[in-house]
């Protein structure tokens, strides 16, 4: 291989390595965002689960109160 061909080859190799690192960085950034969003969605899911539980309890208490009111009228 001539010196210029070798230089061209090395330059291309360096360019490929640089692109690989850029892609790797972009993927790492996206994975970081995905992890944060996953945590956020998990928190939202937990909040909704708790809210649903409290709503069911409230409805149950309201139903029990209505039943007691009907029974006391009878």
Image: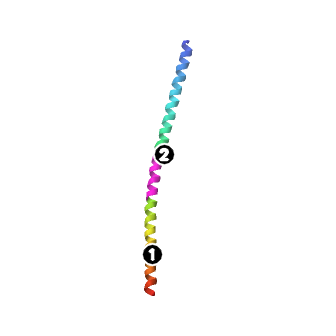
Marked residue nearer the N-terminal end (2 or 1) = 2
Q: Is residue 12 above or below residue 1?
A: below
**What is the count of numbered marks?**
2
Looking at the rendered image, the quarter that the C terminus falls into is bottom left
In this rendering, the answer to whether 16 lies above or below 66 is: above
Name the residue nearer the viewer: 64 or 46: 64
Extreme residue in the top direction: 2
Helix, strand or loop status at disc 2: helix
Q: How far is mark 2 from mark 1, CA to CA?
A: 41 Å
Q: Residue at x 46, y 46 (%)?
A: 35
**Magenta span main SS:** helix
Q: Secondary structure at mark 1?
A: helix
Q: Nearer the viewer, mark 2 or mark 1?
A: 1
Looking at this view, name the residue that lies furthest to the bottom: 74
41 in magenta: yes
- Residue at image x 50%, y 27%? 17
Q: Is residue 2 found left or right of 73 in the rendered image? A: right
- Label 1 belongs to which residue? 62
Which quarter shows the N terminus?
A: top right
Magenta segment range? 33-46
Q: Say which mark, if any, is on residue 34.
A: 2
Crowdedness of circle 2 by 10 Å Cα count: few (<14), some, many (20+)?
few
Q: Horizontal and vertical percent for residue 63?
A: 46, 76
| Residue 45 lies in the magenta-colored region | yes
In x, y percent, where is residue 2? 56, 12
Q: Is residue 2 left or right of residue 43?
A: right
Q: Residue 47 location in percent, x, y?
A: 44, 59
Of residues 29 and 71, the one nearer the viewer is 71
Rendering coords of residue 55 (x, y %): 45, 67
Q: Which mark is residue 14?
A: none
């Amino acid at each position: 291989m001539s010196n210029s061909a070798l230089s061209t080859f090395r330059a291309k190799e360096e360019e490929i390595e640089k692109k690989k690192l850029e892609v790797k960085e972009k993927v790492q950034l996206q994975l970081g965002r995905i992890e944060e969003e996953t945590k956020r969605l998990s928190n939202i899911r937990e909040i909704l689960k708790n809210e649903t539980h409290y709503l069911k309890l409230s409805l149950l208490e309201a139903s029990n109160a209505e039943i007691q009111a009907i029974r006391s009228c009878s």
